[in-house]
Image: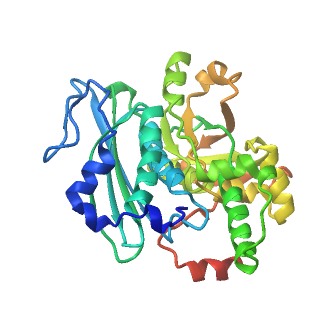
Amino acid sequence: MFQDSQDMRTNLSELGEFGLIDHLTKGFEPKLSSTVKAIGDDAAVLNFENKHTVVTTDLLVEGVHFDLAYMPLKHLGYKAVMVNASDVYAMNAKATQITVSIAASNRFPVEALEELYSGIELAAKLYNIDVVGGDTTSSTSGLLISITALGIADKEDIVYRSGAKPNDLLVVTGDLGAAYMGLQILEREKEVFKANPNAQPDLDPYTYLIERQLKPEARKDIAPLLKELGVKPTSMIDISDGLSSEIIHLCKNSQVGANLYEEKIPLDPAVISVCEEFDIDSTTIALSGGEDYELLFTISQEDYDKIKANPNLTVIGHMAEEKEGMHLITRANQKLPLIARGWNSMEDKNEKSEKKE
């Protein structure tokens, strides 16, 4: 959120498009040897030598993907980079460069966009990513951010969604559901504030959950970790739309079935506690919440001993023959069909609220 102040407001029109680009990107200096030419020409020039290049793009739209009532602009810039870097890491590749394009309405002064870009700059610095280009334009409907990320990997290291085999183990990094519950807390406090603008929320008990929503971290550590352990996943995807949706993607692309064990799903104690507070089933949140940006992958059973003691990784199930279908095995040992109920940006918000009721 940007606090508008008349004594520190520079209208975008004062700089113009190219002046604004120069102003916002003056702190971006290329660090990687693969960046031959970054910002300042008609196109960036990159040299990856004998590496394969992966490319991914995400568009974030105000009112659809983020709410500036509780999302600080610096955090938004950081998160926008993470959303894209996560897709690169899900290919078992290393993120190297990004381009950043924004469309902003005239309610955003230059200082607001400086906040946004300070988050982008911080993420790029911490993840060793070069910002090599982009675009700016005006918008009649708030703020839009589009980031394209590039990454590199040796041909033999790249992992697709389509390589899982029956009996492969299903593995997830980190814990699930925290980002969604962080969002629920922020939405609740937003409604409290609307009813009583003088109310001061106590968010200290929810720090972990809110951080997972506002400042997620992409799992850049997993590809080098797996390489060190001598493990190459047979398939991989990042968890942006909910665990169930991502398992279904892997199954459909690999033409296999899956058995997911409820008791194995990793949940932080804070998630369990807040789910009880909201009277929501924690397994449902893990399956459908999304925005965790953890990695979900499959490995051969022969590799189990290599990963079993690692605290970053949890085996949550196994793949099966396609004809067996996709199932959740509950704690009561019931076998339920796995259904995708994750985030759908194309779904009408009113329809979504009606379904929940």
Q: In the picture shown, does residue 231 fall above or below 183?
A: above
- Most extreme residue toward the left, as rendered? 42
Number of callouts in the render? 0
Left or right of 190? Residue 290 is left
Q: Nearer the viewer, residue 181 or 102?
A: 102
> Of all residues shown, which one is farthest toward the front?
7
Residue at 25% across, 49% down: 22
Check the image and report above or below for 294 versus 288: above
Tell me the quarter of the picture where residue 128 sits.
Answer: top left
Q: Position of residue 81 (x, y in %)?
A: 44, 46
Q: Left or right: where does residue 283 sit relative to residue 70?
A: right
Quadrant in which the C terminus is drawn: bottom right
Query: What colour scheme governs how the chains and residues are painted in the rendered image of this protein?
Result: rainbow
Q: Return the x and y of residue 223 as percentages of the image width and height.
A: 49, 28
In which quarter of the view is residue 349 placed? bottom right
Residue 134 visible somewhere in the drawing:
no
Q: Answer with the quarter of the image where residue 60 lies.
A: bottom left
Identified at 27% across, 64% down, the residue is: 14
* Side of 215 relative to 29 (left or right): right
Image coordinates for residue 356, horizontal then vertical, percent: 70, 76
Q: Is residue 174 visible?
A: yes
Q: Give x and y (percent) for residue 307.
A: 64, 23
Eyeballing the image, is 249 above or below 223? Answer: below
Residue positioned 55% across, 62% down in the render:
1
Q: Nearer the viewer, residue 25 or 344?
A: 25
